[in-house]
Image: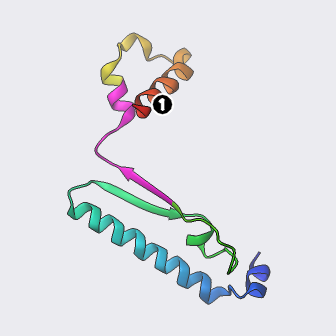
Amino acid sequence: MSEALEESGAGKNTVMERRGSYLWRERLAMMLLNITGQNVECFHFGSQSEGTTIPGLQSDIDFLMSHHDVNIMFYTIEKTHPSLWFEHNIMFLLWLCLHVFRK
């Protein structure tokens, strides 16, 4: 992979520069969101942030934001009867958590 990147013009310096710039973008996004009172973490991932995309490829930017204000699992546990929370119900409980998440 590194040889293919090197041949395309995306050498080690380009890879390190991209990684650094995306780490900086994550940090800046988190600071701005935290200043506005939002308790979040931001993550860039994928070929753009890893610096492994080929120049001119038009690849997308993968971004994940994790909100720390709500925990779906705890919320679902609070809102359901304790008799549901057994190992044999694991698939139903997973569905229930995802259903709560969609609301």
Q: Which residue is drawn at 67% across and 74% down?
A: 53
- Image quarter where the N terminus lies is bottom right
- Residue that badge 1 annotates: 98
Q: Residue furthest top?
A: 83
Image position of 91 with respect to 41: above or below: above
Residue 70 in which image quadrant: top left
| Residue 27 percent location from the top left of the image | 36, 70
Does residue 58 sit above or below 85 in this rendering?
below
71 inside magenta stretch:
yes
How many labels were placed on the picture?
Answer: 1
Disc 1 element = helix
Tell me where residue 31 appears, x and y as whole percent.
28, 68
* Residue type at numbered disc 1: Leu
Disc 1 packing (10 Å; few <14; some 14–19; many ≥20): some
Which of these two is toward me, 85 or 93? 93
Question: What residue span does the magenta drawing correspond to?
Answer: 63-76
Report the side of 67 relative to 49 (left or right).
Answer: left
What colouring does the structure picture have?
rainbow
Indicate the quadrant containing the C terminus: top left, top right, bottom left or bottom right. Answer: top left
14 with respect to 73 (left or right)? right
Q: Position of residue 6 (x, y in %)?
A: 74, 86
In front: 53, or 77? 53
Find residue 63 and report its horizontal and vertical position in percent: 49, 60
Using the image as rendered, state which of residue 98 and residue 84 is in the foreground.
98
Give residue 79's quadrant in the image.
Answer: top left
Residue sitting at 55 percent across and 15 percent down?
88
Q: Does the magenta stretch include residue 95?
A: no
Indicate whether 57 appears above or below 74: below
